[in-house]
Image (cartoon, helix red, strand yellow):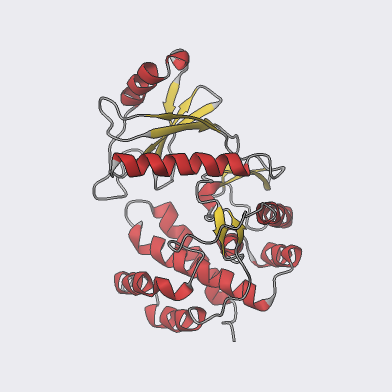
Amino acid sequence: MLWGVKMHANELTVSVETVRELVDEQFPEWRGLSIKQVASRGTVNALFRLSDRLVARLPLVPGDVGQMRQRIESEARAARELLGRSRFPTPAPVGIGEPGDGYPLPWSVQTWLPGTVATDADPGESVDFGHDLAEFIQGVRAIDTHGRTHAGHGRGGDLRAHDAWVETCFQRSEQLLEVPRLRRLWSVLRELPRHAPDVMTHGDLNPGNVLVSDNRLAGIIDVGSLGPADPALDLVGAWHLLEAGPRQVLRDDLECDDLEWARGKAWAFEQALGVVWYYVDSNPTMSLMGWRTLERLMAEPAPN
């Protein structure tokens, strides 16, 4: 998170001193490692570098300890499943910590990946980056689902299941966005049919989860959402990350038909609409990402 800025009403405060105590008590082999907070624009975890090779991730929002442990264990399984399946680096799970003095939840440790997040190193005009992102998506799609299907919650299933959330976003965005025009677009997007079976997806290809170096894809982080879903779900990256030319390169590489492309637009719309109002004060960078995505979406013709 950004130091000193709370993004959620009940957000936990995590200090370097607290992390030092947790690490020293639970992972004594790392007592000699330096600890430094990362000024992240992420919204879910506070991040702390452990020397130059590891990162501790401490959830920011309070919750049930058992459920949080299950989530972190699920994220670790997802990270192991993705590891090495692409030439682009992804984090490896290293350990899971327990609640301790000053911090009430389980937490995790992963390998640290070099690179600059795409919110700070905008690759939007890079054709090479468009090719790279398409290659990563192809690599994820090639992972066997082993018969698994979408879990039934979150993005990647039925578009119409998000109507209530989208309506909340419209109501919260009256002073921020051209809501009547956005309502008309959603009325079309939500009706798009779904024919393709689930494939494996990263699940959250927004700029904060994408690392860039020299306008090329340097790595992908926050891989805990990996799982089976609508093949169009990872196309959100086309609008979150790319301008028109590189976006077309990605579409061509993935050989997206009109329906898949339009459903990708729908998932990007649903995500972008939510982050604009929710983070407008607490995380302006995230809110601006939503604004820019909606502008890109509205610049394209609506699906027929």
Q: Position of residue 178 (x, y in %)?
A: 40, 77
Q: Tell me the quadrant of the picture where the N terminus can be found.
A: top left
Residue 221 visible in the shown view: no
Foreground of the two, 188 or 106? 106
Quarter of the image for residue 261 reads: bottom right
Q: Is residue 300 visible?
A: yes
Numbered-mark total:
0
Residue that sits furthest to the bottom in the current view? 304
The one of 27 and 57 positioned closer to us in this rendering: 27
At 53% from the left and 56% from the top, the residue drawn is 203
Q: Where 118 falls versus 55 (above or below)? A: below
Residue 252, image x, y percentages: 75, 67
x 55%, y 24%: residue:
52
The quarter of the rendered structure image containing the C terminus is: bottom right
- Residue 302 in the image: state x and y as whole percent: 56, 82
Q: Nearer the viewer, residue 54 or 171?
A: 54
- What is the x, y in percent for residue 91? 57, 37
Which picture quadrant has residue 281?
bottom left
Q: Is residue 285 left or right of residue 211?
A: left
Residue reaching furthest front? 147
The answer to whether 243 appears left or right of 64 in the picture is right
